[in-house]
Amino acid sequence: MLLNIRLFFLSQFAFVVTLTYGQPTQSKPAIPSLTHTGEIWKDTDGNIIQAHGAGVLYHQGVYYLFGEIKKGKTWLVPNQSWECYRVQAGGVSCYSSKDLVNWKNEGIALAPNPTDATHDLHLSKVIERPKVVYNRQTRQFVMWMHVDSETYGYSQAGVAVSDQPAGPYRYLGSVRPNGQMARDMTLFKDSDEKAYLIFASESNATMHICQLSADYLSPTSTYKRILIGQHREAPAMFKHQGRYYLITSGCTGWAPNPAAYAMASQPLGEWKTYGNPCIGPDADSTFHAQSTFVLPLKGKPNEYLFMADRWNKLDLEDSRYVWLPLHMVNQQPQIRCPEN
Ligand code: GAL
């Protein structure tokens, strides 16, 4: 299995480089691959994958991909001081894969609410960046996500649980951890089984990293303000050789901007910001994408998969995916895009 993934990674990466060099992003043929550079990407039924702002759970030899389902026509929310493009909240999708290449649709993991306009998951609301971790103690799969109102004023973190990795998940409600706003977010489970919710707070000016309760179902009062005043969002966290890394984007809505990474020796320790991990042409726009997750590749200690969204603000349902190899070199992350 491990060898397979390694071979897939290397061969598919080379395959993509060979076949797509110099081709415009949107016109590339759909190649089954572990990496993605904005092509139309289909599941094993031949349907276009809807998994935006995604995260991956690895459980008992299977990868589960969770993401936002964006449905229908995009609209511009009126009377906003910023360009607020929105689309119907279609809930959270789940796809499974044993090789990170072929993805089977497992159906809707967390269904939206079509009838109650006051419900967090109503179609008119915002459901973004779902992430799932497994709690060994309770044997439950716990999903956290950003839930918001149409104008992003609600700013809460929602939580749902399931006994099965693919769901269906049962929504438990939402919270402002320690009374603080929660927008773009991710989850991180450490090797000591402690889990953390990392989110853009304080009107996106500062991130918070908050330890979750032992059952992962609620925030605790143990939290730290990090990247203070740096206006970062789209967090994606991973651990490499005992150090913690957080890749983030700037705050420019659906428009791409340069990524940056921060590093700390403890999740609740001192986080120091470094430069852009992206290298080469289009690095300054994160290859026209925005971070969402970093997946460690099994059996490859220096290799990770960097997952990002290439948003299409005028047709959000047609937003694409940029999944690239992330190599650790001298304890620094480096991301290159094979199409450049
Ligand atoms: C982005 C954020 C997305 C979405 C968007 C709305 O900056 O990362 O998840 O919230 O803003 O404009």
Image (cartoon, rainbow, N blue to C red):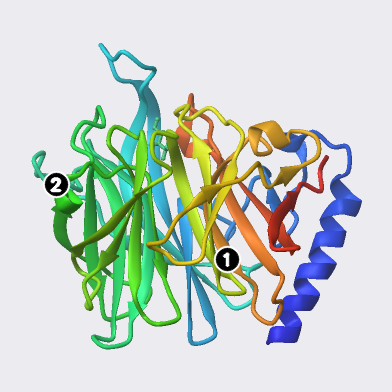
| Residue underneath mark 2 | 179
Give the vertical position of 312 relative to 126 (above or below).
Answer: above
| Residue underneath mark 1 | 295
Amino acid identity at mark 1: Leu
Question: Is residue 165 or residue 185 the one in the foreground?
Answer: 185
Rendering quadrant holding ligand 1: top left
Q: Residue at x 23, y 78 (%)?
A: 214
Q: What x and y, as percent, mark residue 179?
A: 14, 46
Question: Is residue 336 or residue 277 the one in the foreground?
Answer: 277
Instruction: Tell me the quadrant of the picture where the N terminus can be found.
Output: bottom right
Q: Tell me how far mark 1 sits from mark 2, CA to CA.
A: 30 Å
Q: Residue at x 40, y 58 (%)?
A: 93
Say which quarter of the image contains residue 61.
bottom right
Instruction: Tell me the quadrant of the picture where the C terminus can be found.
Output: top right
Q: Residues within 10 Å of mark 1 (few under 14, many from 20)?
A: many
Question: Is residue 86 or residue 137 the one in the foreground?
Answer: 137
Secondary element at image label 2: helix
Is residue 121 something that shows in the picture? Answer: yes
Give the vertical position of 195 relative to 33 (above or below).
Answer: below
Q: Residue at x 45, y 67 (%)?
A: 266
